[in-house]
Image (cartoon, rainbow, N blue to C red):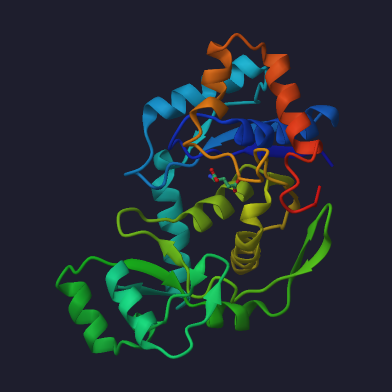
Amino acid sequence: MEIVTRFAPSPTGDLHLGSAYSAWVGWHRARESGGRFLVRIEDTDIRRCRREYEHAILADLQWLGLDWDGGVRRQSDHFADYGRILDQLDTRGLVYPCFCSRADIAREIAASAAAPHGPDGPLYPGTCHHLGTAERRFRLAAGEEHCLRLDAEKAAALVGAYHFVDEARGRIEGQPLLMGDFVIARKDTPTSYHLAVTVDDHLQGVTLVTRGEDVLPSTHVHVLLQKLLGYETPLYAHHRLLTDATGRRFAKRDRDMTIRAMRESGLTPAQVIDKALRSATDGLGAATGRP
Ligand code: GLU
């Protein structure tokens, strides 16, 4: 089967060495197998994403020689597609509106004796899950701002046991409740990162998802959504994150770690790729000891 990989940056800053490494992994796996490498712009967080970063990221990829196949898919151009899938989940009673602000959620968590925790902190305490139908209808009719959440328990019961395979880690049993009732559509868009990734990987025929191991917890719910929507589950290869000598992850705020800064300092594309690969194998990137 042809390998199709993708690199899916969010345009919230310049490409840095860590994400360039991620792009290289996807590109390399596609090219060594004669497959396809796709680029997708994940700009569903419309307040944080900027078109100039998108252009800069694509220019950096080109400069690095990480050429992609076909056009670039920009998620904000496809809100209607995600909206249709969302409607399907809604019709099946799998989503509910959540009117809570961040402050409401924090207050509720502080007041509860044992708030369940997920990989990103406390899970949503389920406040709006328990709203009565009449109140829900009234607040929707009043136009109250809300996001939509997946009813994870209901989804888990529908899907049953499931698993996915990570190349380095092997078979991983799906944990459908890992992220609790996660946001499936943000307040301002008819989608969320989790929904858009799942839909796009399916629509684009991605067979091998290469991305940082920080996203591994999310994979549990992406596969849950794939099962709900009848999609194939791709193979996963979560790679280690590059870190500096002190073990700290490279982030968009590290200006000197951006590809732009490296270009300006006179490094060649080959030298930058070499630096990324060395950081990944040298132990500089040994934050977790995994490949
Ligand atoms: N847009 C995500 C990011 O920039 C990519 C995660 C993924 O590859 O699924 O972190």
- State the residue in front, 257 or 131: 257
In terms of image quadrants, where is residue 188?
Answer: bottom left
Left or right relative to 263: residue 168: right
Kindly identify the residue that appears in the image at 66 percent across and 33 percent down.
Answer: 23
Kindly identify the residue that appears in the image at 26 percent across and 81 percent down.
Answer: 136
- State the residue in front, 16 or 147: 16
Task: Find residue 135 and report its horizontal and vertical position in percent.
Answer: 22, 85
Kindly identify the residue that appears in the image at 63 percent across and 53 percent down.
Answer: 214
Instruction: Report whether residue 99 is seen.
Output: no
The furthest residue to the left: 142
138 is higher (above) or lower (below) than 228: below
162 is higher (above) or lower (below) than 115: above
Task: Find residue 197 and report its horizontal and vertical position in percent.
Answer: 55, 51
Task: Find residue 75 and report its horizontal and vertical position in percent.
Answer: 46, 42
230 is higher (above) or lower (below) than 64: below
Instruction: Report whether residue 14 is seen.
Output: yes
Kindly identify the residue that appears in the image at 60 percent across and 8 percent down.
Answer: 266
Quadrant for the N terminus in the image: top right
The furthest residue to the front: 246
Q: How many labels does the image show?
A: 0
- State the residue in front, 246 or 167: 246
Left or right relative to 109: residue 221: right
- State the residue in front, 1 or 53: 53
In terms of image quadrants, where is residue 154?
Answer: bottom right
